[in-house]
Image (spheres, coloured by chain):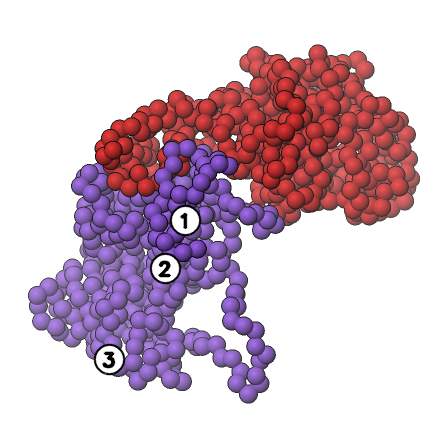
Chain colours: A red, B purple
């Protein structure tokens, strides 16, 4: 066969566009074949937005109000459970805390889980708990565990073939401390980077990720690619490299250029949002992240994580001044989260979009970890009584009872699940939900069996720890 | 393994080999992130000046107090060079040269140079530096270019308009003594097909329209360095390398991703880091005064170890324009770097 004929036979160049979606499903790893056939549940949602309040969001100061005592000099800190008073929500039996008035108004659109629990991992390290929450496995591991977003990208593939299936908004992976740990779970692990996150740390700059390089006008960009494709067709050395390798490489180049020249890329451009709507979200980087997430999901993103960003001792990681810090954070998250739910609803996609609001654990005024834990007290404002404002806040990490809110995606509307004790220790006393069950629930909503397993060196690796995660089906409508 | 296996042609497969694959020859493999970046650096001349950390490869020997290890460093020296040009009426293009003798090969020699507006410099026939931006002087280690005995520096200098001047200083250690070679009236200037004349000193360094440009802080060692290039594996992981599959330090991996992913393709198509290498590389190659045709042939030989065929030449001529437009050269470099033929090694 002559080179010319060989090239003619390889008509794949012309068909790449059509083939891309299917081809994404043929990555490096294989499904585990030695077990019973996996039957995926029927999907209740097509997209998932994870709102990650990194650093340990104190449930008693947010979604799970307890006995409130205002700041008063000399007050015994032991008596304080919450530093914010409770407020009513759109649902009679659900109260949350002051500063979350907008979220309160949309509580009738979702389910609030108050009994999420985390394992006692000894000395509290946010990155270990965050790794656990995002992958379902406690580090260190012998396998690079994939992020739940990577599971969705791997099992479900992109919803819209042009839009990357796993997008991570708001978290810098450099220069914010614990960077190696952050990077370790912000990955597709053994699935390989095809299923890894597209990282957009700054929502305002997101558009730059899908634009031609700085200073290159679009005409030159598409021209360059056109010449490149012509050049490949003429290369006499094409027959020396295997078809599947070239096809895969050109498919990726093609997918990249399709996104970079698509209408969907405008979803990354926040300047295209009407000003009025933009302003409603614009409480800062996180708020703009919520707006970006909404725009991306509208265009068919599969999984989007938006975070307030984890930086040690900053944001939700309150080791002192907890009350004033949380008051500030509420201003940042309250409006955009509520607006996101309302917008998704108004656009008719809330029912098929699962929104999860979560954090790696809760916080408590007194207890580090859970009662009896060997975890070290890491408060930076230790005092038996309140002497100055910096003492006022929940400064210890608590793993015994955490709130997770879920909206859309087939969950019950205006519903409450689980309960924590009314007095310290504020442990989950009803229907505790460990991380693997929470993941099983999220996966179930997305139409992925919690028992799904892929082969890693002849052994199965499951979507939820060892395949044991049980979906909390009670929360579904 | 026998030499036959080494010399065998690579196996070409239509589909990905499975468990039942029977060895028929090596399969082409995509370069790792570090290999690809090394290759790009090599061609664009953008190797970093220094590794991130010191790697000591020699066997560890106990220090001997009688012969302490000496590190050759230059002491800071004032720039005494003068701005020079062809004498008489200021002409646009001049060649400059200087011959000098060294009693021994220098232990270290650092060149600082700049020209209003552009120059390319050879030492003993070897290109050591070039620039088109007088405000960004070149600083390079030229130790390896110098030799014992007679040495010759040749400079092709060009002025685009306005003031004209070339200045350079090579500080070096000859034996135990530090010396300098500086531009001054002992240099010779030469007009196309003309006679070699003594160069004119227009201003000392620090004066004239250019000021003390060679003293600029952070004069970077740019483009051409005669020292051994620093490999990508010896510098810290950056966004581009991570995207291309270089693992995090804390992740133990035994294989690298075999396939280019969409997100990687996006980074290769619009990422700032690669765009930066392309831009520097274009400046570098364009300043060598090659025609578009020469440029394409050079690039194919360097990058792909072959000549372009007629069709490729036609397509790339459209891309490269006259070979002097930096934007066009950037696009030329990109097109070749993105070829599977470049990215897969056999």
For the C terminus of chain A, the quadrant is top right
Q: Disc 3 designates what residue?
A: B150
- Percent x, y for residue B123? 26, 70
Q: Quadrant of the N terminus of chain A?
A: top left
Task: Tell me the SS state at disc 2.
Answer: loop
Label 3 in the same subunit as label 1: yes
Kindly indicate whether the residue at mark 3 contacts the one at mark 2 (C-beta within 8 angstroms).
Answer: no
Q: Residues within 10 Å of mark 1 (few under 14, many from 20)?
A: some
How many marks on residues?
A: 3
Same chain, labels 1 and 2: yes
**Residue A400 relative to residue B213: left or right:** right
Residue A12 rendering spot, x and y as whole percentages: 34, 27
Q: Crowding near pointer 2: few (<14 within 10 Å), some, many (20+)? A: many
Query: What is the spatial separation of the Cα atoms under label 1 and label 2, in whole angstroms?
Result: 20 Å
Which quarter of the figure has residue A359? top right
Which one is in front in this view, the residue at disc 1 or the one at disc 2?
Answer: 1
Earlier-in-chain disc, 1 versus 2: 1
Q: Which residue is mark 2?
A: B222
Between A463 and B243, the residue placed more toward the observer is A463
Residue B87 makes an appearance in the image = yes
Q: Which picture quadrant has residue A33?
A: top right
- Helix, strand or loop at disc 3? strand
In the rendering, at what x and y percent does residue A436 appear?
72, 30
Disc 3 to disc 1: CB gap under 8 Å: no
């Amino acid at each position: 066969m002559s080179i010319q004929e060989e090239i003619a036979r390889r008509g794949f160049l012309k068909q790449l566009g059509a083939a891309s979606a299917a081809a994404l499903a043929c990555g490096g790893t294989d499904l585990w074949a030695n077990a019973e056939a996996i039957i995926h549940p029927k999907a209740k949602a097509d997209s998932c937005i994870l709102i990650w309040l990194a650093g340990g969001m104190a449930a008693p100061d947010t979604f799970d109000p307890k006995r409130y005592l205002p700041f008063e000099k000399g007050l015994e800190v032991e008596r304080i459970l919450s530093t914010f008073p409770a407020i009513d929500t759109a649902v009679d039996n659900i109260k949350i805390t002051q500063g979350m008035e907008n979220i309160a108004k949309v509580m009738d659109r979702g389910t609030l889980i108050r009994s999420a629990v985390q394992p006692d991992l000894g000395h509290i390290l946010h990155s270990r708990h965050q790794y656990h929450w995002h992958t379902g496995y406690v580090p260190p591991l012998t396998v690079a565990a994939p992020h739940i977003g990577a599971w969705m990208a791997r099992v479900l593939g992109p919803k819209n073939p042009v839009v990357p299936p796993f997008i991570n908004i708001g978290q810098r992976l450099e220069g914010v401390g614990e960077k190696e740990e952050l990077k370790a779970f912000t990955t597709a692990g053994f699935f390989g980077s095809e299923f890894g996150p597209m990282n957009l740390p700054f929502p305002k700059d997101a558009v730059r990720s899908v634009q031609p390089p700085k200073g290159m006008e679009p005409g030159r960009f598409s021209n360059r690619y056109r010449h490149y494709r012509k050049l490949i067709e003429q290369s006499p050395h094409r027959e020396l490299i295997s078809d599947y390798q070239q096809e895969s490489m050109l498919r990726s180049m093609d997918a990249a250029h399709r996104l970079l020249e698509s209408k969907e890329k405008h979803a990354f451009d926040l300047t295209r949002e009407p000003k009025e709507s933009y302003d409603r979200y614009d409480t800062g980087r996180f708020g703009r992240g919520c707006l970006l997430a909404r725009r991306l999901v509208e265009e068919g993103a599969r999984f989007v994580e938006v975070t307030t960003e984890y930086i040690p001792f900053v944001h939700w990681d309150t080791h002192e001044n907890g009350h004033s810090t949380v008051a500030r954070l509420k201003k940042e998250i309250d409006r955009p989260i509520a607006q996101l739910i309302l917008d998704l609803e108004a656009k008719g996609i809330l029912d098929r979009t699962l929104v999860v609001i979560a954090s790696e654990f809760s916080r408590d005024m007194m207890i580090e970890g859970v009662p009896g834990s060997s975890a070290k007290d890491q408060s930076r404002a230790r005092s038996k009584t309140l002497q100055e404002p910096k003492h006022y806040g929940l400064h210890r990490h608590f793993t015994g009872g955490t709130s997770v809110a879920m909206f859309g995606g087939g969950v019950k509307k205006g519903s409450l699940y689980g309960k924590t004790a009314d007095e310290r220790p504020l442990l989950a006393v009803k229907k505790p939900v460990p991380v693997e069950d929470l993941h099983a629930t999220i996966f179930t909503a997305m139409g992925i069996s919690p028992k799904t397993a892929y082969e890693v060196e002849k052994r199965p690796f499951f979507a939820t720890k060892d395949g044991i995660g049980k979906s909390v089906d009670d929360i579904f409508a | 393994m026998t030499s036959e296996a080494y010399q065998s042609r690579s196996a070409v497969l239509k589909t990905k080999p499975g468990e039942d694959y029977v060895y028929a020859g090596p399969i082409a493999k995509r370069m790792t992130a570090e290999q690809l970046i090394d290759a790009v650096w090599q061609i664009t001349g953008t190797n970093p000046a220094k590794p991130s950390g010191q790697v000591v490869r020699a066997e560890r020997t106990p220090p001997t107090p009688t012969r302490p290890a000496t590190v050759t460093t230059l002491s800071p020296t004032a720039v005494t060079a003068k701005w020079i040009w062809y004498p008489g009426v200021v002409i646009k293009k001049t060649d400059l040269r200087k011959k000098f003798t060294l009693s021994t090969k220098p232990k270290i020699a650092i060149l600082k140079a700049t020209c209003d507006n552009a120059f390319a410099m050879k030492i003993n026939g070897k290109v050591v530096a070039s620039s088109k931006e007088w405000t960004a002087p070149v600083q390079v280690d030229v130790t390896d270019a110098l030799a014992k005995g007679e040495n010759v520096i040749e400079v092709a200098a060009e002025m685009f308009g306005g003031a004209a001047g070339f200045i350079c200083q090579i500080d070096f250690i000859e034996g135990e003594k530090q010396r300098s070679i500086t531009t001054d009236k002992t240099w010779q200037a030469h007009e196309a097909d003309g006679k070699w004349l003594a160069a004119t000193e227009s201003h000392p360094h620090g004066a004239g329209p250019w000021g003390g440009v060679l003293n600029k802080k952070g004069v970077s060692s740019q483009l051409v360095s005669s020292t051994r290039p620093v490999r990508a594996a010896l510098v810290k992981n950056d966004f581009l390398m991570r995207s291309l599959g270089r693992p995090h330090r804390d992740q133990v991996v035994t294989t690298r991703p075999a396939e280019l992913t969409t997100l990687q393709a996006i980074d290769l198509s619009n990422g700032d880091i690669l765009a930066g290498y392309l831009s520097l590389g274009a400046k570098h190659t364009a300043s060598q005064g090659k025609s578009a045709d020469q440029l394409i042939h050079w690039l194919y030989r360097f990058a792909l170890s072959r000549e372009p065929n007629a069709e490729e030449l036609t397509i790339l001529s459209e891309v490269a324009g006259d070979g002097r437009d930096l934007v066009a050269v950037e696009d030329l470099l990109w097109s070749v770097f993105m070829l599977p033929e470049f990215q897969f090694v056999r």
